[in-house]
Amino acid sequence: MEGLTVNPWKRHGKDRLYVNLPDGTPVAWADRDSKVITVKVTEHRHEAVALLRQHLGDPVTVRTDRPAPSPPRRPRPAKPPQQPSPPAKVRRDRRPLPLPDLTVADDLAKNPPGAVILSDMAVRGPSVVSRAWSKLLNRPSGWETWLDGLEGEKRVGRELERLTVHGWRVLHGIPKGNGGDIDHLLIGPGGVFVFNTKRHPGASVWVGDEVAKVNGSPHPYPAASKAEAAYVRGVLERYAGFAPDVVPVLAFVDVASVVRAPTQHTVRVYQEREVSALGPTSGRLSPDQVEQVYAVARHKRAWLRS
């Protein structure tokens, strides 16, 4: 049962217990009142039921979550024979759109973590001397939020770079054609992960399905991360010719605690040091597919055209 956790959930008059994997994927849940256990992932059935019995006691009812059967259809009157239709076309991956030859100016591979913030600060922000003077006088410079974001991206970026020994590729500061930027993109055997990094020193964080609360204040972090993953998936499919799995990730830096709602299993949620858990994951992309996706992702024109 190592790695499985039991999480209480109360909402809309329901009182449930969820058993989740370390990445937040629910494998079973139970209704406290009826003591009915519903198993969603059969590979963990025995461990999940044993954990829930410790909270519910005996007897319990165990069932497996299966799709509801379709209602029976009424028989239709027979139709007169028709000419046979041509065979249906098999859906294939779309032909990728071409990109121009990669130039030094368009290559995102050398971008450091926080590249977009650094670029904006170089153009519009205070000088290094001005920032040092403001710090010395304990006077706000107006760029504290930017500097917090930069520090967070640098630290998560360092953790992601450690994964390259496992065959992963990492990109930072990807500018988006629809505005904004992608903090980090991790591409490797376990798929594609799009990182949204948030630094909130000393804060208590709760992450729900669409909203995160930082010290009780709501922020649309999960919804934004899911939208960003959909955007990345569309770009990669357009230029790589296939749609890889793209997983949204929220990475928190310097927070005191992170609690994820039991129903939240679409967005991965990590603290800074936990992203290394992705290193050994595999089975999603072959080495050739990793390089194919990386070749598209590192090309700035692919993102600015979208």
Image (tube, helix red, strand yellow):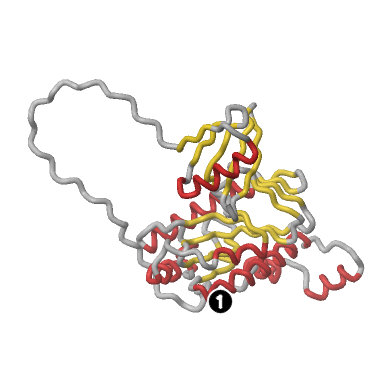
Residue 135 quadrant: bottom right
Q: Which residue is situated farthest in the right direction here?
A: 137
Residue 224 versus residue 74 in the image, above or below = below
**In the displayed structure image, the side of residue 97 where residue 16 appears, left or right:** right
**In the displayed structure image, the side of residue 109 where residue 92 appears, left or right:** left
Residue 82 seen from this side: yes
- The percent position of residue 249, horizontal first and vertical second, equals 58, 56
- The percent position of residue 100, horizontal first and vertical second, equals 39, 71
**In the displayed structure image, the side of residue 13 where residue 141 appears, left or right:** right
Which residue shows up at 67% across the image and 59% down it?
271
Residue 177 vs residue 261, the one in the foreground = 261
Residue type beneath disc 1: Lys
- The percent position of residue 171, horizontal first and vertical second, equals 54, 69
- The percent position of residue 158, horizontal first and vertical second, equals 64, 72
Residue 1 vs residue 28, the one in the foreground = 1
Q: How many marks?
A: 1
Q: Secondary structure at mark 1?
A: loop
**In the displayed structure image, the side of residue 51 where residue 192 appears, left or right:** left
Residue 55 versus residue 126 in the image, above or below = above
Which residue shows up at 54% across the image and 68% down it?
279
Q: Which residue is situated farthest in the bottom direction here?
A: 104
Residue 106 seen from this side: no
Mark 1 Cα shell of 10 Å, populated few (<14), some (14-19), many (≥20): few
Residue 5 versus residue 146 in the image, above or below = above
Which residue corresponds to mark 1?
110
Residue 101 vs residue 210, the one in the foreground = 210
Residue 133 versus residue 196 in the image, above or below = below
Which residue shows up at 50% across the image and 74% down it?
107
